[in-house]
Image (spheres, rainbow, N blue to C red):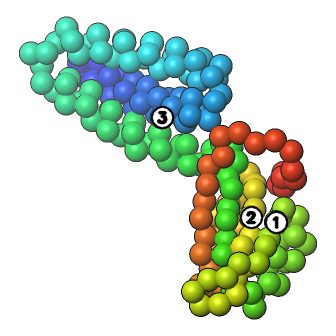
Amino acid sequence: MLFELIFIFLARVLDVSLGTVRMILVIRGDRIPAAIIGFFEILIYTVALGLVIGSLNEPLKLLVFCSGFALGILLGSILEEKIALGYRGVQVTIDSEHGHIVEELREEGFPVTCWEASGKAGSKLVLNIFLKRNMAVAVADKIYEKDPDAFVVFMEPKHFQGGYIKKK
């Protein structure tokens, strides 16, 4: 009985975690890897469900099944955040007096396109940066170190073509 409960719990954690990653791949348009993950996700789910459906008179199994689902959501989102698949667009608005940030980022190899803009509080620069997703927070942190009042927006591009992207 204990082995069965542990199996149900771990199976749910695994299948829901896989489901989280699969959904992100689908949204990004990566259909083949998503389909492969989906195959294993539903296989694991079906086995775990079979162990619970046949034992609905044992509420502990249902509780373990649901607990595995909840933890799977949490772990799946953490896993997705850690592997940080794909790319991210970062749009930054800074005061013009902080224009040195543009050159500093370029010297570090980041692709920065910028243009002048006017805001409520005066002259601004808008920076457009496109990079690997796992680098986006680090770039934003560098910008905030130099201009704590910077306005930073992260965007998830689904498709792009051309341009320059920093690889590492």
- Seen as rendered, the residue at the extreme left is 57
Mark 2: amino acid:
Asn
Mark 3: amino acid:
Thr
Q: Secondary structure at mark 2?
A: strand
The Cα–Cα distance between marks 3 and 2, rounded to whole angstroms, is: 29 Å
Residue 95: image x %, image y %?
Answer: 69, 86
Quarter of the image where the N terminus is located:
top left
Where residue 61 sits, quadrant-wise, is top left
- Which residue lies at the image location 84% right of the left edge and 55% below the top edge? 166
Residue annotated with mark 3: 20
Q: Earlier in the sequence, mark 2 or mark 1?
A: 1
- Which residue lies at the image location 44% right of the left edge and 16% below the top edge? 42
Residue annotated with mark 1: 113
Q: Which dot marks residue 128?
A: 2
Where residue 152 sits, quadrant-wise, is bottom right
Quarter of the image where the C terminus is located:
bottom right
- Which residue lies at the image location 55% right of the left edge and 43% below the top edge? 80
Q: Secondary structure at mark 1?
A: strand
Residue 100: image x %, image y %?
Answer: 82, 84
Q: Earlier in the sequence, mark 3 or mark 2?
A: 3
Q: Secondary structure at mark 3?
A: helix
Is residue 43 left or right of 167 when viewed as pictured? Answer: left
Residue 9: image x %, image y %?
Answer: 33, 28
Q: Which dot marks residue 80?
A: none
Residue closer to the observer: 157 or 106: 157
The Cα–Cα distance between marks 3 and 1, rounded to whole angstroms, is: 33 Å
Other residues around mark 3 within 10 Å, as few (<14) / some (14–19) / many (≥20): many
Is residue 94 left or right of 110 when viewed as pictured? Answer: left
Residue 87 visible, this angle: yes
Other residues around mark 1 within 10 Å, as few (<14) / some (14–19) / many (≥20): few
The Cα–Cα distance between marks 2 and 1, rounded to whole angstroms, is: 5 Å
Q: Is residue 124 above or below residue 25?
A: below
